[in-house]
Amino acid sequence: MSPAIARGGQIPLDLRLRDSSRFVGYHPGGNALARDAVEALSAGGEGGERQILLHGQPGVGKTHLLQAACHRGHERGDPVAYLPLGALTGAVPDAVLDGLERAPLVALDDLDAVLGQPAWEEALFGLLNRLRDAHCRVLLAALHAPEGLPARLPDLASRLAWGPVFRLQPPDEAALKSILAQRAAWRGLELPDVVAEYLLRHYRRDLGALLELLDRLDLAALAEQRRLTVPFVREQLARAGPGRGTDSEGAD
């Protein structure tokens, strides 16, 4: 797996990019413009956008695009930084963000998790200024557009809107089935169309949750030496117990 943070060949935090999060594996649906903009930003070069913010509900592909851009930069040998801020809320902000301006590409995910905390807001404000001065490329992801984020520092709110802002739309049923089939193929699984349809009828239509479920089904099928069939999937969903249905939240 590619390093999520690389500065001078070192990886100070144990964070990793998902191998599956590549531009080639992203099904844009109604998000083609956003995908193209992020891919263009990741290519670097003179001109073009230097900062993009993606927003939308969990499961619409924000993390996928941020990590795909970091993969692209890492493949060129560039230092890249991907930070899922939701996993770092207990860290000292300055310690986490210090020196990121040395990476040509910086991706900050889950902004909502730290906004409203004075120490984090001050640290992010300083980082965005340093990144702009260093001509870095910046990708940001949050649940809401800048004007809807809980930033208490007005100057930080204005800096979050320095570049284009894209609201990502959730994938439709056809896209979900295509994504599930692709993930299954990557794992060496056969996912019959009838099984994919069953999953979409009986499980929440959140892409992140569906992919996590498919991974669990793969492990269970391997352990029990069974194929993915509707009866097998029905058994696994029953074993998962309450709280796994369409009302639960999923991951991005």
Image (cartoon, rainbow, N blue to C red):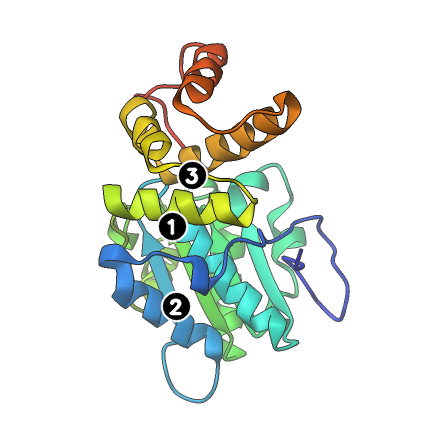
The three-letter amino acid code for the residue at tag 3 is Gly
Residue 162: x, y in percent? Answer: 33, 68
Front residue (pair 165, 72): 72
Mark 2 and mark 3 residues within 8 Å of each other at the beta carbon: no
Q: In the picture provided, is 67 more to the left or to the right than 37?
A: right
Q: Earlier in the sequence, mark 2 or mark 3?
A: 2
**Residue wearing tag 1:** 61
Q: Is residue 50 visible?
A: no
SS under mark 2: helix
User: Which residue is rendered at x = 41% and y = 71% of the image?
Assistant: 39
Q: Are marks 1 and 3 in contact (CB under 8 Å)?
A: no
Q: Which one is earlier in the sequence, the residue at label 1 or at label 3?
A: 1
Question: For the view shown, which residue lies furthest in the bottom direction?
Answer: 46
Q: Residues within 10 Å of mark 2 (few under 14, many from 20)?
A: many
State the residue position of label 2. 38
Q: CA distance from mark 2 to mark 3?
A: 20 Å
- Name the kind of residue labelled 1 in the image: Gly
User: Whole-Å distance between the Cαs marked 1 and 3?
Assistant: 8 Å
Locate the N terminus and report the quarter of the image it occupies: bottom right
